[in-house]
Image (cartoon, rainbow, N blue to C red):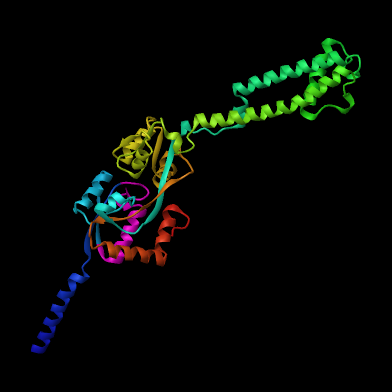
């Protein structure tokens, strides 16, 4: 009886010692609403980063508590002051943040993009180029010159070339048609000028036609180019003097500051997009995946994202400086890369591969 009691006490002691090791570690993570990385959906935490955090929690035996805050700056400030264990959303890894906090290894490769209001997106077209006033004026002048040239040839050739042997009231269109064909096709073999002045003038018209065709091609090209330049933004260099908006303190804001580009700074994404939808902000510079998700889900009728991405950057999970959670998190992230679970998660949210 005493032996059984002794064994029972020993097992109880061992279980009580092992219990803390089996108990999940409570970890608090700050986040902010940034679709498609972090957003509340139906009372649940959703998004690429939130699903990544849940996978980490399972691998590391964390009891994950999500604390959704109102602003990006508050999310980071709580980490810096040690009020929470970490923060995760679309947090760009920068030297300034790394100086006061610790990052995990990168969890996502991103970059900046430009989103234009649809009313400001102009696709140059041949029709609109042909209807430009400059080109219409050039066409009008060309028609007058061809008519005058044809009538001069009629004066020179009406007694020498049967084609031109007709009265004035019947000669104007055949003469114009002869001059037009001379410019476009090089003339008619059977209607070669026969008079001395007609031959000299015909040669002048043929040589001049080379310049006339070149002028028309140049006019069409120039009209289309001017239309594209005046109506749209083609690169970062076109942002100067435009109504640009981004989020205060973001890497996009830092980029615009370095380029001396004026912009309106908004406290959060909701305020920025509301101003954009109202038509006050005409151009948004921000994280490429966030802008693309907005256009695909809500803003296709309002905004269009330019195809070119610039200033490649990487997102990471951020911890208070010296946090013991960094190394376990990095090992778990590497494990996700190796077993393919990261690639599966990436394809779910963004399609394609994901390294």
Q: Position of residue 119 (x, y in %)?
A: 47, 31
> Image check: 98 left or right of 6?
right
> Image check: 76 left or right of 234?
left
Q: Position of residue 183 (x, y in %)?
A: 77, 26
State the residue in front, 62 or 150: 150
Relative to 241, say whether 170 is above or below. above
Q: Residue at x 34, y 37 (%)?
A: 272
Task: Please give the range of residues in magenta.
Answer: 33-62
Residue 245 is drawn in which quadrant? top left
State the residue in front, 45 or 287: 287
Is 313 within the magenta?
no
Q: Residue at x 86, y 11 (%)?
A: 167
> Image check: 300 left or right of 10?
right
Residue furthest left as drawn: 2
Q: How many marks?
A: 0
Is 38 within the magenta?
yes
Residue 179 is drawn in which quadrant? top right
Residue 236 is drawn in which quadrant? top left
Q: Is residue 265 visible?
A: yes
> Image check: 229 left or right of 274?
right
Q: In what quadrant of the picture does the C terminus appear?
A: bottom left
Q: Residue at x 91, y 14 (%)?
A: 159
Q: Position of residue 19 (x, y in %)?
A: 18, 72
State the residue in front, 3 or 22: 22
Q: In what quadrant of the picture does the N terminus appear?
A: bottom left
Relative to 150, say whether 74 is above or below. below
Q: Is residue 66 visible?
A: no
State the residue in front, 127 or 202: 202
Q: Position of residue 251 (x, y in %)?
A: 34, 45
């Amino acid at each position: 009886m005493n032996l059984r009691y002794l064994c029972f006490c020993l097992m109880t002691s061992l279980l009580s010692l092992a219990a803390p090791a089996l108990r999940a570690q409570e970890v608090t993570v700050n986040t902010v609403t940034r679709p498609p990385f972090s957003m509340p959906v139906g009372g649940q935490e959703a998004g690429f980063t939130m699903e990544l955090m849940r996978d980490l929690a399972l691998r590391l035996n964390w009891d994950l508590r999500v604390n959704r805050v109102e602003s990006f700056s508050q999310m980071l400030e709580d980490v810096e002051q040690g009020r929470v264990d970490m923060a995760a959303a679309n947090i760009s890894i920068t030297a300034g943040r790394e100086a006061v906090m610790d990052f995990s290894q990168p969890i996502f490769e991103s970059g900046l993009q430009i989103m234009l209001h649809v009313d400001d997106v102009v696709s140059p077209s041949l029709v609109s180029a042909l209807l430009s006033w400059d080109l219409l004026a050039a066409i009008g002048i060309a028609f007058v010159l061809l008519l005058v040239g044809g009538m001069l040839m009629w004066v020179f050739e009406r007694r020498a070339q049967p084609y031109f042997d007709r009265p004035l009231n019947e000669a104007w269109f055949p003469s114009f048609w002869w001059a037009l064909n001379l410019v476009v096709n090089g003339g008619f073999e059977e209607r070669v000028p026969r008079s001395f002045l007609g031959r000299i003038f015909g040669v002048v018209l043929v040589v001049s036609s080379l310049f006339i065709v070149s002028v028309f091609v140049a006019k069409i090209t120039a009209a289309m180019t001017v239309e594209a330049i005046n109506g749209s933004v083609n690169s970062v260099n076109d942002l100067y003097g435009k109504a640009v908006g981004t989020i205060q303190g973001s890497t996009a804001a830092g980029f615009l500051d370095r380029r001396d580009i004026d912009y309106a700074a908004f406290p959060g994404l909701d305020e920025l997009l509301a101003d954009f939808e109202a038509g006050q902000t005409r151009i948004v510079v921000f994280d490429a995946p966030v802008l693309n998700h907005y256009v695909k889900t809500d803003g296709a009728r309002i905004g269009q994202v330019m195809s070119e991405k610039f200033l490649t950057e990487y997102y990471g999970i951020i911890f208070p400086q010296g946090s013991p959670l960094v190394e376990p998190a990095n090992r778990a992230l590497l494990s996700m890369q190796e077993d393919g679970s990261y690639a599966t998660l990436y394809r779910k949210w963004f399609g394609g591969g994901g390294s």
